[in-house]
Amino acid sequence: MHIRFATGNDGKLREARDYLEGIATVEQVDYDYTEIQSASLEDIAAHGARETYRHLQGQADADGVEGVDSPVDGVLVDDTGLFIDALGGFPGPYSAYVENTVGVERMWGLAREEDDRRAHFRTVMAYADETGVETFTGSVAGTLVAPRGDEGFGYDPIFEYNGQTFAEMVAAEKNAISHRGRALAAFADWLADSQ
Ligand code: ITT
């Protein structure tokens, strides 16, 4: 089984490869799909996967090679957000924009002002193939803390789960309990059932 993962985020790619080892090979695809403006991670991911699949299919047809025409050759997209309870779910679907503008340290600065520092990560994985699009969701609740740890990526240093930040865990430990790991588990179950 071979899957194309449309992402520019090496951390996401590493975790998906790690989780799907023995189930599927994961190829990174560099296609800048349209990130639609929506409060729904499902809509953003499903739209991105459908668009990328159509693009690759069109490219394969134009090249005269066999089309991307079986569940073996589907496209995966991952849309993730960090939702902070005391901030009404901010940054949520805007997490990438906020990381790239103000950065993780300043997000912690905002959260530190709050008594309630609960937050959750949510990932939606969308998988598109010739039969359509399926979405798989995973989430994990934790607490925001001052940055600790060098593993992981993005908001991992400020997200604590059971006394450890995600940046203090290696990929396999994080995958066992994380939003992405849970979405990948649902995806892997679906793949196994559909074969
Ligand atoms: P794509 O190319 O896949 O879109 P991206 O980094 O832009 O990569 P998103 O739009 O899903 O991804 O943005 C999610 C933001 O949340 C972004 O700032 C990520 O660094 C961060 N993020 C995603 N997954 C994370 C995780 O498991 N731990 C910490 N931060 C994460």
Image (cartoon, rainbow, N blue to C red):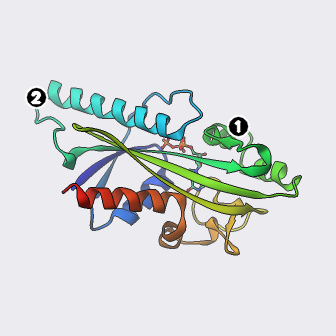
Side of 114 where 157 appears, left or right: left
The residue located at (75%, 43%) in the rendering is: 88
> In the picture, residue 92 is in which quadrant?
top right
Give the distance between the C-alpha atoms of the residues marked 2 and 1, in whole angstroms. Answer: 42 Å
- Tell me: residue 172, above or below residue 3: below
As shown in the figure, which amino acid type bears the numbered disc 1?
A: Thr
Q: Which residue is mark 1?
A: 101
Q: At 34% from the left edge and 63% from the top edge, which residue is drawn? A: 20
Q: Residue at x 27, y 56 (%)?
A: 191
Helix, strand or loop at disc 2?
loop
> Please, what is the three-letter code of the amino acid marked with disc 2?
Gly
Residue, disc 2: 64
SS for callout 1? helix
Query: Which percent across, then down, holds residue 65?
Result: 11, 34
* 163 relative position to 18: left or right: right
- Residue 55: image quadrant is top left
Q: Count the marks: how many?
A: 2
Image quadrant containing the C terminus: bottom left
Mark positioned earlier in the residue sequence (2 or 1): 2
Residue 126 position in % (x across, y down):
39, 44
Q: Position of residue 188 (x, y in %)?
A: 33, 60
Given contact means CB atoms under 8 Å apart, are the residues at marks 2 and 1 in contact?
no
Quarter of the rendering containing residue 168? bottom right
* Left or right, 112 with reference to 131: right
Left of 142 or right of it: where is 192? left
Q: Nearer the viewer, residue 8 or 79?
A: 79
Q: Give the residue drawn at x 22%, y 45%.
A: 73
Which residue sits furthest front? Answer: 193
Q: Tell me if mark 1 has few (under 14), some (14-19) or many (20+) residues whose alpha carbon lies within 10 angstroms of its own.
A: few
Q: Nearer the viewer, residue 169 or 190?
A: 190
- Front residue of 172/11: it is 172
